[in-house]
Image (cartoon, helix red, strand yellow):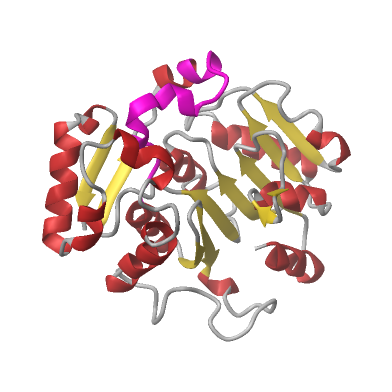
Amino acid sequence: VLERLDHGRRGGAGRAAVVNLGAHDGTCSYSGKVVDPANCAFERGHPGIALEGKPGLLQKSSAHWDGVHLHEGYISPWNVSKIVRDSMEAHQATSISLLKIDLDHADCFFAQALLSDPALPLPDILVVEYNKAFPPPVRFQERFSDATVADFSGAEDSWLVFGKRRQWMGCSLQSWHDLVSDLGYRLLAADFEDLAFLRTGLLDLGGGSGELGMESGGGGAAGDWLFDVWLEAAHCAAPSRRLHGVQNFANLDLRALAEKGWEDRCHVAFSWWVHERGYLHSDMSCR
């Protein structure tokens, strides 16, 4: 992702902005692993906007960022587009090179707000956190809640707000794929934390060779390949058995979701969702 950003800055026209929804404390990498490519881009001199709910959390790390506008305070899908538009206007930016979303809450709703705004350009690269518990073809999407955001403001760590319902956070791989594929994005990379999508027209633009994306063919409806991506990135990657605490709070052995066939997988996920009343704050379906 960073190589593509640097390549685009050298060869692109106009001024591009990096948009980081959920910049946290400004950390770029930890123990040699990139944990936030947008923060890394800021360190490399890319201009843009960093949004973080916790006031003061970004001040130290961002002190040496040049051309980056800081927005502190919690946002919603209803105001995020205006915040980004105003920042881009202030920077005289004409494009978005990278949009990264990691808000720990209803990330798909924020993506929909930005990607559907006709006044905003579609980002070249999209990096998002995803819910690892639900494999394709399960579409899981947490709904936005003002009450949850209010709870965030009073908690030291947003994860504390969710407690024993961490499995009902965010958006599943299938939901993300379906949301962005119709806009011309293809899956570039997936790991235990994030998904990276690239706009189709940029797949052949330097900075790489051979297979530039994880999708084959025309990038149409997802098939078994997307389930294989989930297996490799989330289920088979240590410590997948616990999924960073999700298994600890689930009344279901999450291995069942990986071992069942297509229809049974959906049935198991839906039954679990109903039993734990996930429908109170999320939506679920199967493609």
Name the residue at 46% across, 47% down.
Answer: 116
Q: Is residue 186 left or right of residue 210?
A: left
Quadrant the N terminus occupies: bottom right
Residue span colored magenta: 151-172
Q: Quadrant of residue 124?
A: bottom right
Name the residue at 39% across, 53% down.
Answer: 240
Q: Measuring from the top left, give residue 164's x and y in whole percent.
A: 34, 28
Q: Is residue 201 visible?
A: yes
Q: Quadrant of residue 203?
A: bottom right
Does residue 152 belong to the magenta stretch? Answer: yes
Name the residue at 27% across, 50% down.
Answer: 139
Q: Measuring from the top left, give residue 147's x and y in whole percent.
A: 40, 17
Name the residue at 28% across, 59% down.
Answer: 136
In the depicted structure, whether residue 252 falls above or below residue 121: above
Q: Is residue 96 visible?
A: no
Choose between 181 and 207: the one closer to the eye: 207
Does residue 165 belong to the magenta stretch? Answer: yes
In the depicted structure, whether residue 247 falls above or below residue 98: above
Residue at far top of view: 154
In the depicted structure, whether residue 161 falls above or below residue 256: above
Q: Measuring from the top left, give residue 255's x and y in whole percent.
A: 25, 54
Quadrant the C terminus occupies: bottom left
Residue at far bottom of view: 210
Q: Measuring from the top left, give residue 45's x and y in whole percent.
A: 84, 52
Q: Is residue 129 left or right of residue 99?
A: left
Q: Quadrant of residue 14?
A: bottom right
Q: Is residue 72 left or right of residue 113?
A: right
